[in-house]
Amino acid sequence: MSPRIILDTARFHIVIDRLCHQLIENHKDFTDTVIIGVQPRGIYLAERIVRRIAAIKKGLNIPSGKLDITFYRDDFRTTKSPLKANQTVINFSLEGKNIILVDDVLYTGRTIRSALDALLDFGRPADVELLVLIDRRLHRHLPIQAKYIGKTIDSINDEKVLVEWQEQGEEDKVWLVHKINPERS
């Protein structure tokens, strides 16, 4: 099976714009709302959303942060090579805040479960909403759903969603590729 593009660069940017407008519609002036990107790739989407909303809403400054979930993962002790932790950057209290948790791909739900556990170490939020660029809806292990979805796809277990970011020196694109080793991913 050859790789296929799910979102080309133009559609990628349209999807991000649409997600921003949905957030603006639901959160208006973003009072008591913060945006948290899940490390490692959710941070690129979170940063883009914060910048784009600031451009649309003429300089609106939404508090944002980066959340590392490495040691909250249910599989961190079972990997063959040691996991490398990223840095969590949350310079504000989450107590009573409305949190928009951002990740690139929602697959089994285990990453988001880990993120929810990690968030609670920073306070008790009033509400948590999930925003994802791609929702792989058929393979959920946990009852977790996103409120804001860029694109929903159906795929088989032997496929992987690969998101390329300008921030990593790539073109903004989303691919569906065949996994080389389906048991590791």
Image: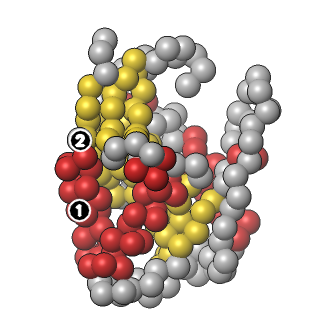
Q: Which mark is residue 170?
A: none
Q: Earlier in the sequence, mark 1 or mark 2?
A: 2
Say few, some or many: other residues with alpha carbon within 10 Å of mark 2 (under 14 / 14 to 19 / 20 or more).
Answer: few
Q: Which mark is residue 8?
A: 2
Dividing the image into 4 quarters, which one contains the C terminus? top right
User: In this picture, is 68 found above or below 175?
Assistant: below
- The x, y position of residue 176, in whole percent, is 34, 28
Q: Nearer the viewer, mark 1 or mark 2?
A: 2
Count of residue discs: 2
Label 2 secondary element: loop
Task: Compute the Cα span from label 1 to label 2.
Answer: 15 Å
User: In this picture, is 175 found above or below 118?
Assistant: above
Report the residue that reaches farthest toward the front.
Answer: 169
- The x, y position of residue 27, in whole percent, is 35, 79
Looking at the image, which residue is at 37% across and 23% down? 177
User: In this picture, is 12 found above or below 173?
Assistant: below
- The x, y position of residue 74, in whole percent, is 70, 38
**59 horizontally vs 21: left or right:** right
Q: Which mark is residue 18?
A: 1
User: In this picture, is 85 found above or below 22?
Assistant: above
**128 horizontally vs 154: left or right:** right
Looking at the image, which residue is at 45% across and 84% down? 61
Q: Amino acid at mark 1?
A: Arg
Label 1 secondary element: helix
Looking at the image, which residue is at 50% across and 36% down? 108
Looking at the image, which residue is at 30% across and 68% down? 20
Say few, some or many: other residues with alpha carbon within 10 Å of mark 1 (under 14 / 14 to 19 / 20 or more).
Answer: some
Q: Amino acid at mark 2?
A: Asp
